Amino acid sequence: MAVSGKVSGSAAADRVRVRHPYSRLPNWVYPTFVVAALSLFGAFAVWVVFFQNEGYFAPYLSPFYSPEIRVGSIPPGVWVAWAPLAFRMTCYYYRKAYFRSFFWHPRSCAVDEPKRKYRGETVFPWVLNNFHRFAFYATVVQVCFLWYDAVVAFNFGGRFGIGAGSVLMLVNVLLLSGYTFGCHAFRHLAGGELDCFSCSMVARARHKLWQGVTVLNIRHDRWAWASLMSVAGTDIYIRLLLAGVLHDPRWIA
Ligand code: FES
């Protein structure tokens, strides 16, 4: 162990081996990526939800429109987009990402920040982040609809078939499920407030569930980005089919 101000050779080597994005990439890369990706997705989502009316190319339904609700001339995305929006806005990972990247609040652990007073998430609008658990419930319902849509995507006029869109929709719902069920709030629901994991059948079942959620939770950030991109990718693919720009390749139909 180093007892002076100097770092011993092995400690320095250990430090070099630490895998951490801030030590391996230039400081600006991560926040720039977060700001660019979230801004682009946000602008695209606003365009789809508020200015588009069609997102269905048989048998594929855009994830922005599921479940499809039509009332008058109101774009169908308006009725459903609030749930995933609230879920992602209040997600523990995204909170860290946008606080650090958009507001530099704080830029990173143990880094000074421009804000003088830290009030945590106790005032509007950040206090709304405490409703994350309720956004989780709403999103679980939506993920059920997306699984239904993914199954329907293999039904071509009553016959089983596989198209590129079917695969895309299946991958999309798998990624969304990995993101949704790796949620920190769900992990707490599964195994939180239990003093003993082995004292009853229910406790053991909850422990198993908690272990499963933990597997997804470890890479929650990657599920978050992958599912965000798959939602946009699936919607864009369906839009290109609708516009006649692409032809859906079918392997069995
Ligand atoms: Fe990210 Fe719940 S913490 S979805």
Image (cartoon, rainbow, N blue to C red):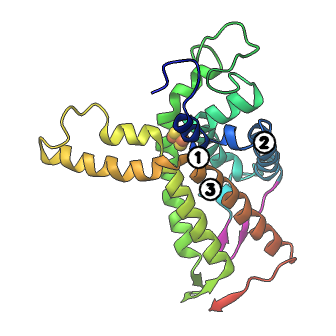
* Disc 2, SS: helix
Q: Quadrant of the C terminus?
A: bottom right
Numbered label attached to residue 227:
3
Label 2 near ligand 1 (CB < 8 Å):
no
Q: Is residue 54 above or below residue 30?
A: below
Q: Position of residue 127 (x, y in %)?
A: 58, 20
Give the residue displayed 12% in from the left and 41% down from the top.
Answer: 199
The reply to whether dot 2 and dot 3 touch (C-beta < 8 Å) is: no
Residue 69 visible, this orientation = no
Residue 25 lies within the magenta run: no
Disc on the earlier residue, 1 or 3: 1
Q: Which residue is mark 2?
A: 29
Give the residue displayed 61% in from the left and 11% down from the top.
Answer: 119
Gap in angstroms between the C-alphas marked 1 and 3: 10 Å
Give the residue displayed 78% in from the left and 64% down from the top.
Answer: 236
Q: Which residue is mark 1?
A: 221
Q: Nearer the viewer, residue 232 or 158?
A: 232
Disc on the earlier residue, 2 or 3: 2
Magenta residues, as a range? 52-61
Relative horizontal placement of residue 1, taking residue 47 as reference (left or right)? left
Residue 56 lies within the magenta run: yes
Amino acid type of the residue that numbered disc 2 sits on in the rendered structure: Val
Amino acid type of the residue that numbered disc 1 sits on in the rendered structure: Asp
Q: Is residue 1 above or below residue 41?
A: above
Relative horizontal placement of residue 172, taking residue 33 as reference (left or right)? left
Q: Position of residue 94 (x, y in %)?
A: 63, 38
Q: Nearer the viewer, residue 98 or 6?
A: 6
Amino acid type of the residue that numbered disc 3 sits on in the rendered structure: Ser
Q: Position of residue 188 (x, y in %)?
A: 37, 37
Residue located farthest toward the bottom when viewing the structure as drawn: 252
